[in-house]
Image (spheres, grey):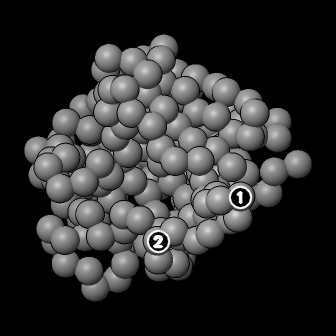
Amino acid sequence: MEYFEKLPLIFDENKLLAALCQVLDIAPWERQHQICLTKKEGEKSPDCFYEGNGGIYRTMVDGQEVIRQQELDERDYNVFIPEFEHTYFKEVYDTLSKKFKLGRVRILLKEPRSTLSWHRDPEPRLHIPIITNPGSIMVIENVAKHLPADGSVWITNNTKYHNAFNGGEESRIHLVACVLNYKFN
């Protein structure tokens, strides 16, 4: 599919939830709505838990595309953070790394009744929904899709204009990885 592709991979839903709880015990949401699972070589804890947040993306202002935020070299985020190695996320990371060249791997929180701006990124993303609700939708160009929290792995074409919104009353939490070697048809 041009925007959303469900991959033939499945992870254990209960283990994903348990890993999320383990990570949140170490790195709570207090500082950011993103928690990094990978870091650059030499980055120190606890700053590396939040350091990879941001990154280059393009958005529309007055009908013109502009770059918002700093440019990151996704290839630099190739070290799994040691404090999280005891979690199921390490197994997920190892499995995904055998199939894809990954950049940043993060846990992303979308709070209830919130949205991201309309933007595009330099590369596709892998999404593994961990917690979601029916009102949590991702829109790429003019295609809207709910990604269920059932252990499935999705690749999304974030090189196209997109946003994510959570119109529900519960948080939406995904494990999201930048994919450096994937081309959509």
Q: Which quadrant would the N terminus be assigned to in this image?
A: top right
Confirm whether residue 9 shows in the render: no
Q: Viewed as shown, does residue 176 lie left or right of 66?
A: left
* Residue 83, picture quadrant: bottom left
| x 67%, y 27%: residue | 144
| Residue type at numbered disc 2 | Gln
| Residue type at numbered disc 1 | Gly
Q: Nearer the viewer, residue 71 or 12?
A: 71
Query: Where 95 falls versus 53 (above or below)?
Result: above
Give the crowd class for mark 1: few <14, some 14-19, many >=20 residues within 10 Å: few
Q: Position of residue 148 (x, y in %)?
A: 52, 21
Q: Nearer the viewer, residue 164 or 105?
A: 164
Give the crowd class for mark 2: few <14, some 14-19, many >=20 residues within 10 Å: few
Callout 2: SS: loop
* Residue 132, picture quadrant: top left
* Residue 36, picture quadrant: bottom left
Q: Viewed as shown, does residue 19 lie left or right of 105?
A: left
Query: Where 118 falls versus 59 (above or below)?
Result: above
* Residue matched to label 1: 63
Real-space Cα distance between discs 2 and 1? 18 Å
